[in-house]
Image: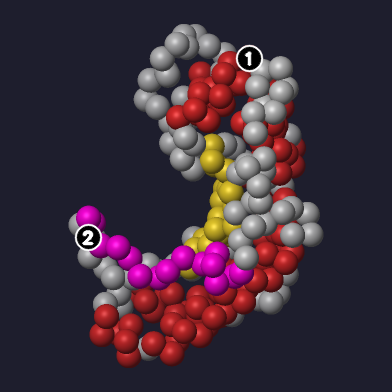
Amino acid sequence: MNIHKDTLDFLKDLAQNNHREWFNAYKERYLASQNNIIEFAEALIAEMNKHDRIETSSGKKSVYRIYRDVRFSKDKSPYHTCWDGHLHRASKKLRGGYYFHIQPGASSADGGFFGPAPEDLKRIREDIDVNHDDWRKLFNDKAFVQTFGKLNGQQLKLMPKGYAVTHPAIDLLRHKQFILKRQFTDAEVLSPDFVFLLSDTFKGMRPFFDYMSEVLTTDANGVSLI
């Protein structure tokens, strides 16, 4: 299952005409684009379940609504000009989430930990403190660097409390988010092999996810917390 050119063309036109009159006039294009993304997400879930355990039950449940919530936003444009979807991993022991973003000229695969709970962030920083060499090994891996480049995500401006500014892992300890990202060209998105490329990209996140799952579900002695 591939993403159709008409789907990207619809998003391009929507970006130029982000108002209800145009959207209602071209409702059939929206529905065709939405159905294409849902079918693509269904195929992606099937591929992902060959190497991971995904609890998202359908492509429809994975894809976000195109309608924006503008109640608290200065930007009152009523529609997103992209298609986004999220795949949840099954069980409390499998940590990390997969996210895909389809937008002309700005498509990407993202994954990781977008908003760790305070207790999880505490555990992560405790592990970085004592095992930062293991973290460096993950992020310096050749395949990781070629695919994702570096660790992304919001960081504190200052060091978290309890850690010295001279800590050798100051850059990692300042992270509030731990996100991996790979961008794709429109040609890649429209390729019939894109579903496999996206699945393989998510699979490339697994060493980090597996490590984080261990950190977040066991104590310092390796005893399960779940």
Q: What secondary structure is found at the residue carrying circle 2?
A: loop
Amino acid carrying mark 2 in the image: Arg
- The picture places residue 90, in percent across and down from the top left corner, at 66, 51
Q: Residue at x 72, y 59 (%)?
A: 48
Crowdedness of circle 1 by 10 Å Cα count: few (<14), some, many (20+)? few
Rendered image: mark on residue 179: none
Q: Quadrant of residue 168?
A: top right
- The picture places residue 74, in percent across and down from the top left corner, at 20, 57
Q: Nearer the viewer, residue 126 or 79?
A: 126
Q: Residue at x 32, y 90 (%)?
A: 25
Q: Which residue is mark 1?
A: 130
Whether the magenta-drawn stretch holds residue 29 is answered as no
Q: Residue at x 47, y 12 (%)?
A: 163
200 lies above or below 220: below
Q: Nearer the viewer, residue 180 or 122?
A: 122
Residue stretch in magenta: 58-73
85 lies above or below 120: below
Q: Nearer the viewer, residue 70 or 142?
A: 70
- The picture places residue 104, in percent across and down from the top left corner, at 48, 68
Q: Quadrant of residue 214?
A: top right
Q: Is residue 35 visible?
A: yes
The prevailing secondary structure element of the residues shown in magenta is loop
Quarter of the image where the C terminus is located: top right
Q: CA distance from mark 2 to mark 1?
A: 44 Å
Q: Which residue is mark 2?
A: 71
Horizontal arrangement in the rendering, residue 49 relative to residue 186 (left or right): right
- The picture places residue 80, in percent across and down from the top left corner, at 37, 67
Horizontal arrangement in the rendering, residue 155 relative to residue 180 (left or right): left
